[in-house]
Amino acid sequence: MSFKDIPKIELHLHLDGSVRPETIADMLKIDINKVKEETIAKEKCEDLNDYLTKFELPIKAMQTKENLKRITHELISDLKDENVIYAEIRFAPIKHIENLTLEEVVEAVTQGLKNEDVKTNLILCMMRDSSYEENLKIVELAKKYLNKGVVGLDLAGAEALYKTKTFEQLFKKASKEQIPFTIHAGEADGPSSINDAISFKASRIGHGIRAIEDEKTIKYQYTYNGYTFTLDAEVDAVQTHNAKDAIKSAWGIDVNVNDDETELSLG
């Protein structure tokens, strides 16, 4: 069995980072080589901010209902080809309102999700460089569409420039409204951003690679089918779950898992 043949779950997928280059060229009427030049990151970026510039061109193409629907639909098709059975797609609605309202943006993307072959949901991103008022609108938007295609919130953007701890009040609001959330932390900024995210009761940490810089980090490594996977994370407690129950609890999906938990299929 090849890696492509394995059923997969994708929980960290940025919509604006998953647009086909040919689609951008078609929508913006520019040369495909120009698109690749402006969207493919260098092998070694100067920093996260340098890398984030590669999202600018796709976002320019994502300013109409029709384009948002098409881009989302094409992504679902690509996920099907990769044998992804469940995906949570995240994006920042505030980035797509040149011609649309926040509600129109979410509804357009939701319409693009419709595909019986891949189960999908949305995570709405607040942006670190947005104002408190703008991000509060995203919290309220997530509340409005929660369990109607949206399953949570995220915080993304220039992590080192806008410290995680400064967003505490927004996550307190999200918790009060019972909106699940994940936070990008420990990528450009250090372990303190992970500690802040954990203190806010984030359900997940996006990236968290700099947890290794903290001496309280735990490490877990396992090998599957010739691939070695390593988890580095700072936690207050560790629990283990069988894969079938964990997937059912987290995403409401019934799966069949073999005895050694190395293979799964839809139930």
Image (cartoon, rainbow, N blue to C red):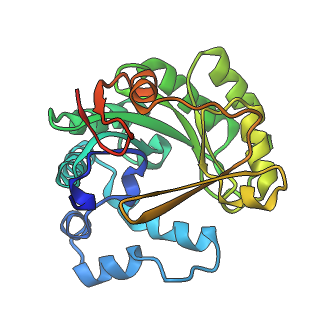
Q: Residue furthest front?
A: 259
Outermost residue on the right side: it is: 215
Q: Position of residue 83 (x, y in %)?
A: 22, 49
Q: Position of residue 249 (x, y in %)?
A: 45, 21
User: Percent x, y for residue 139?
Assistant: 57, 28
Among the 4 quarters of the image, the one containing residue 196? top right
Q: Nearer the viewer, residue 100 or 86?
A: 86
The N terminus is located in which quarter? bottom left
On-image quarter of the C terminus: top left
How many labels were placed on the picture? 0
Which of the two residues, 239 or 62, is positioned nearer the viewer here?
A: 239
Residue 179 in the figure: left or right of residue 30: right
Find residue 32 and report its horizontal and vertical position in percent: 23, 79
Picture layout, residue 234 above or below residue 151: below
Q: Residue drawn 49% across and 26% down? A: 142
Residue ID at (39%, 23%): 248
> Does residue 174 sit above or below 69 in this rendering?
above
- Residue 225 visible (yes or no): yes
Rendered view: 216 above or below 138: below
Question: Does the rendering let one see residue 31?
Answer: no
Locate residue 126: give its quadrant: top right
Q: Quadrant of residue 266?
A: top left
